[in-house]
């Protein structure tokens, strides 16, 4: 039976179970005293039954869909038709995959003769295992239902059981995000480890020549030195972008918290927040089509006739503008967290508003502001779209903002979008870059969150 | 009615017909009072009656509340403090303020005291500043406790020490008037006793106005007492008279604890 049909069937059984249990529980004898009152409401018995019918069967189907392809394949391999297959390896997998496509009707002809021979055997094995899975799932649903049915008694604590099931479901939901992150991290680590078996870590971390187009097979590390990328990332994301974002973000936060009338604040803050939600690709257009050429023109005027429109300055400036709302909102929060009594104390000493801001509020809010800036840096160096569109692909170590520079994220995109085998140092380098970026942003976030935490405690 | 000018003292600050509004709501109605040099004037009354609001008119801290509006006449040494010619920065140097909850800045003890003198440019050299800091801390009765740790953060002191630090901070700019808004309400009895003692010692140099909800405290530290009720000044007079022989029925009810 088809998977979706089967799932719907199980859910249907669950629904029937819900109604049956509910109706049965509703007919409990009226209690004589409050102490005799049934422990659970009819609806809770209904849910208890439905969960017992559906949950084990669906869980089984989930596991079955993961293991049954391997069982089918083993069954196919043990048929006489499989006698002529090559030994375990890439070729055998390819033939089997083709046979599977033919058997499931996803393909109409095979590239490989042997696949056509195997297809009928494959189809037979598949249908046998499908049938087994379906039967087991339905049996489980009935077994669960029968178990729950015997529990429909006035003194049974269905309420508690349902509560427990809800908690379990919530726990699983929250674990999924964590486990996914962990999985991504693990795959990064594994692929990076494969990369570092080919290219020495020191070559990668300290090498200054990055030209993945010309990897020499006898010494791949020589052209995979990531220092120019680290520099470019730092220069664009942590220097140029921050030179824009920190002062403007801070000043807008100071204005919004200290000077703006409530009416002005009421419409300005949401606008800043909307700005933070603009898709980065829009900023990318802006950087590539407007800012980049304008900066090239300036550079030409300044006497750099061969200036590129893919300058570090263009990407960095636009990135800085993108980060302003972020810095502003973090700084806003930390300034607002400084108690009003500090401000009053300073004003009562005769300080003006700007003296109060400069000498009391900002120093007091500094840890929070620093944490905000660290988070902003971590966002900027992870930012991809703007640099993909506006930064150059050529790696160079330069202090001249009019020259082109490239970033880690841009290179990851370039490495993975070309056509290359999955196992080449070039492709694997993308994972090593990803891991490095992950480590740095992770560190920045940890430090920032600790600073924020300590800062919060100071005012509690 | 209330005798606003108590004959034998020189008025430092004098208020006449002061009204304060928060938006449409009137918090102070037609209050007239004189605050005298070398006297402690206590403001008492049930909470919400406008004591803090009135206190804050005297250093124009109400300016920082956007909805607040003050009318009437308040003079410091005969000079209208609400006139456009009055510089608020100078006014607040002359009329210092201590708040209900100790609010030292998150800076060193030294920097807390030096804050005002720096803003007003009172010290020409490091040596002068050191002198001001030492003198202010000594007057606030804190010098002996903190002289070895002037670089420690002011927020690391105990509550009572923090409040004395705030007093030192206020007197570092040589004010003439000191306004205190329930300065002991966040402190334990021992720290409170120290502050009260300090107020006694400071009296000789300043005009002090103190808001308190503690009647014994008013009786202990003040020479003049003003009783506020629902935004009006009900009675103002010598503390001894107010507590032993109030002229108004409402004052008597309040003092004897009939309502609070
Ligand atoms: N910032 C403000 N905005 C609006 N109303 C206020 C404000 N501050 C105080 N009030 C109101 O003014 C009245 C007097 O308050 P306050 O001066 O704090 O009284 P007290 O110090 O005697 O307890 C109260 O009704 C209070 O609600
Ligand atoms: Mg008050």
Image (cartoon, coloured by chain):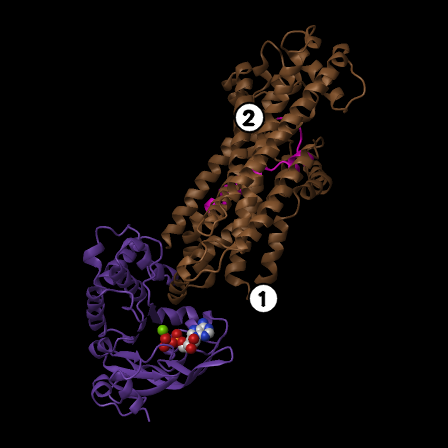
Chain colours: A brown, B purple
| Location of residue A343 with respect to A102 vertically, above or below | below
| Location of residue A244 with respect to A186 vertically, above or below | below
Report if residue B10 is visible in the image. Answer: no
Looking at the figure, which quarter contains the C terminus of chain A? Answer: bottom left
**Nearer to the camera, B18 or A10:** A10
| Chain assignment, label 1 | A
Kindly report the distance in space between the C-alpha atoms of the residues bearing marks 2 and 1.
50 Å
Q: Which residue is mark 2?
A: A187
**Nearer to the camera, A373 or B145:** A373
Q: Nearer the viewer, mark 2 or mark 1?
A: 2
Please say whether residue A376 is one of the residues in the magenta stretch.
yes
Q: Position of residue B225 (x, y in %)?
A: 27, 82
- Element class at badge 1: helix
Q: Quadrant of ligand 1?
A: bottom left
| Location of residue A244 with respect to B37 vertically, above or below | above
Taking the spot 28% from the left edge, 87% from the top edge, the residue there is B253
Q: Main secondary structure of the magenta part?
A: helix
**Nearer to the camera, A349 or B166:** B166
| Location of residue A282 with respect to A434 vertically, above or below | below
- Where on the picture, by quarter, is residue A269? bottom right
Please say whether residue A445 is one of the residues in the magenta stretch.
no
| Nearer-N-terminus badge (2/1) | 2
- Element class at badge 2: helix
Q: Position of residue A187 (x, y in %)?
A: 55, 26
Q: Which residue is mark 1?
A: A263
Residue stretch in magenta: A370-395
Q: Position of residue A31 (x, y in %)?
A: 45, 60
């Amino acid at each position: 039976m088809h998977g979706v049909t089967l799932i719907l069937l199980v859910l249907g059984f669950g629904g029937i179970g819900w109604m049956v249990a509910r109706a049965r529980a509703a007919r409990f004898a009226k209690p004589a005293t409050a102490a005799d009152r049934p422990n659970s409401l009819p609806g809770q018995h209904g849910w208890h039954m439905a969960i017992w019918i559906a949950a084990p069967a669906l869980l089984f189907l989930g596991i079955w869909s993961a293991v049954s392809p391997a069982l089918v394949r083993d069954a196919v391999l043990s048929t006489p038709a499989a006698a002529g297959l090559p030994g375990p390896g890439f070729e055998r997998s390819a033939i089997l995959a083709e046979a599977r496509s033919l058997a499931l009707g996803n393909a109409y002809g095979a590239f490989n003769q042997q696949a056509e021979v195997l297809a009928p055997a494959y189809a037979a094995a598949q249908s046998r295992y499908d049938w087994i899975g379906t039967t087991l799932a339905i049996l489980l649903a009935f077994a669960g239902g029968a178990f729950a049915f015997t529990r429909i008694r006035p003194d049974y604590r269905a309420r508690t059981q349902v509560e427990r099931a809800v908690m379990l479901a919530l726990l699983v939901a929250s674990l999924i995000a964590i486990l996914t992150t962990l999985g991504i991290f693990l795959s990064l680590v594994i692929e990076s480890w494969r990369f570092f078996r080919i290219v020495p870590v020191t070559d990668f971390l300290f090498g200054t020549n990055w030209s993945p187009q010309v990897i020499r097979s006898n010494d791949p590390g020589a052209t995979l030195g990531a220092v120019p990328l680290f520099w470019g990332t730092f220069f664009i994301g942590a220097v140029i972008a921050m030179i824009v974002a920190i002062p403007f973000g801070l000043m807008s936060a100071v204005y919004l918290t200290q000077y703006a009338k409530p009416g002005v604040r009421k419409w300005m803050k949401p606008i800043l927040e909307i700005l933070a939600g603009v898709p980065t690709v829009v900023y990318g257009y802006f950087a590539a089509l407007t800012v980049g050429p304008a900066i090239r023109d300036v550079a030409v005027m300044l006497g750099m006739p061969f200036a590129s429109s893919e300058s570090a300055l263009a990407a960095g400036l636009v990135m800085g503008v993108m980060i302003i709302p972020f810095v502003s909102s973090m700084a806003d929060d930390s300034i607002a967290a400084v108690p009003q009594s500090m401000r009053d104390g300073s004003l009562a000493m005769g300080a003006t508003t700007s003296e109060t801001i400069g000498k009391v509020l900002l120093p007091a809010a500094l840890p929070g502001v620093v944490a905000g800036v660290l988070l902003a840096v971590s966002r900027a160096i992870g930012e991809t779209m703007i640099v993909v569109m506006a930064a150059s692909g050529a790696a160079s170590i330069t202090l001249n903002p009019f020259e082109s520079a490239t970033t880690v994220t841009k290179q990851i995109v370039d490495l993975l979008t070309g056509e290359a085998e999955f196992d080449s140092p070039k492709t694997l380098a993308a994972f090593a870059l990803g891991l490095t970026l992950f480590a740095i942003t992770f560190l920045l976030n940890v430090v920032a969150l600790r600073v924020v935490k300590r800062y919060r405690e100071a005012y509690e | 009615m209330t005798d606003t000018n108590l004959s034998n003292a020189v008025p430092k600050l004098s208020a006449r017909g002061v009204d304060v509004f928060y938006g449409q709501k009137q918090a102070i109605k037609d209050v007239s009072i004189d605050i005298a040099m070398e006297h402690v004037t206590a403001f008492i009354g049930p909470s919400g009656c406008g004591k803090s609001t009135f206190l804050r008119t005297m250093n124009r801290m109400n300016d920082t509340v956007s909805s607040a509006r003050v009318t009437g006449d308040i003079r410091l040494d005969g000079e209208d403090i609400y006139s456009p010619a009055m510089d608020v920065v100078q006014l607040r140097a002359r009329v210092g303020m201590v708040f209900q909850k100790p609010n030292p800045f998150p800076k060193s003890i030294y920097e807390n005291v030096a804050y005002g003198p720096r803003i007003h440019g009172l010290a020409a050299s490091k040596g002068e500043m050191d002198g001001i800091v030492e003198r202010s801390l000594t007057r606030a009765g804190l010098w002996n406790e903190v002289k070895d740790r002037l670089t420690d953060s002011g927020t690391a002191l105990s509550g009572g020490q923090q409040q004395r630090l705030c007093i030192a901070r206020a007197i570092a700019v040589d004010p003439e008037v000191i306004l205190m808004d329930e300065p002991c309400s966040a402190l334990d009895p021992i720290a409170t006793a120290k502050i009260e003692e300090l107020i006694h010692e400071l009296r000789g140099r300043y005009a002090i106005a103190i808001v308190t909800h503690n009647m014994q405290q008013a009786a202990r530290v003040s020479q003049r007492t003003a009783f506020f009720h629902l935004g009006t000044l009900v009675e103002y007079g010598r503390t001894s008279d107010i507590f032993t022989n109030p002229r108004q029925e409402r004052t008597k009810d309040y003092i004897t604890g009939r309502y609070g």
